[in-house]
Image (cartoon, rainbow, N blue to C red):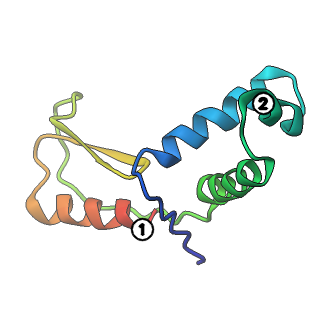
């Protein structure tokens, strides 16, 4: 499985460029036109477009983490690592939470 690491000087770069790419697509303009209107180098735009496209579309493996059945339908916590998140329900033990965190780090 190929893993993509997005290295950014600022942790908000991925969010910023995701928004810019979405804005460009929603504008109805071609990327070159949109970049010219917004003062963005078109090569930089395509650099980030490709990085984010790979990040979103990278192959993800799913596996089941056995847990004891819970009578509660509401999660007691949500863990967010990068762009991924998982709900933790009452009754999850430390090993399950550790496994979830490790799985999120690989996505």
Q: Which quarter shows the N terminus?
A: bottom right
Residue that appears at 36% across and 64% down: 105
Q: Earlier in the sequence, mark 2 or mark 1?
A: 2
Which residue is drawn at the image coordinates 36% and 59% (left, top)?
104
Q: Which residue is mark 2?
A: 25
Is residue 53 or residue 87 the one in the foreground?
Answer: 53
Residue extending farthest bottom: 1
Q: Which residue occupies the foreground of this view, 98 or 6?
A: 6
Residue 62 place in picture, x, y as percent = 47, 62
Residue 102, position as x, y percentages in the image: 30, 67
Q: Secondary structure at mark 2?
A: helix
Count neighbours of disc 1 (C-alpha within 10 A) and say few if under 14, some if 14 to 19, many if 20 or more. Answer: few
The residue beneath circle 1 is: 106
Q: Residue at x 18, y 58 (%)?
A: 97
> Would residue 68 appear left or right of 105 to someone viewing this image?
left
For the residues labelled 2 and 1, the Cα–Cα distance comes to 29 Å
């Amino acid at each position: 499985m190929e893993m993509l690491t997005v290295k950014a000087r600022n942790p908000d770069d991925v969010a910023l460029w995701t928004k810019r790419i979405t804005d460009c697509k929603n504008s109805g303009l071609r990327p070159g036109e949109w970049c010219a209107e917004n003062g963005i180098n078109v090569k930089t735009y395509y650099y980030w477009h490709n990085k984010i496209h790979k990040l979103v579309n990278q192959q993800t493996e799913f596996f089941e983490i056995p847990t004891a059945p819970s009578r509660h339908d509401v999660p007691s916590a949500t863990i967010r690592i990068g762009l991924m998140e998982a709900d933790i329900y009452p009754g999850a033990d430390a090993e399950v939470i550790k496994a979830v965190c490790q799985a999120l780090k690989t996505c």
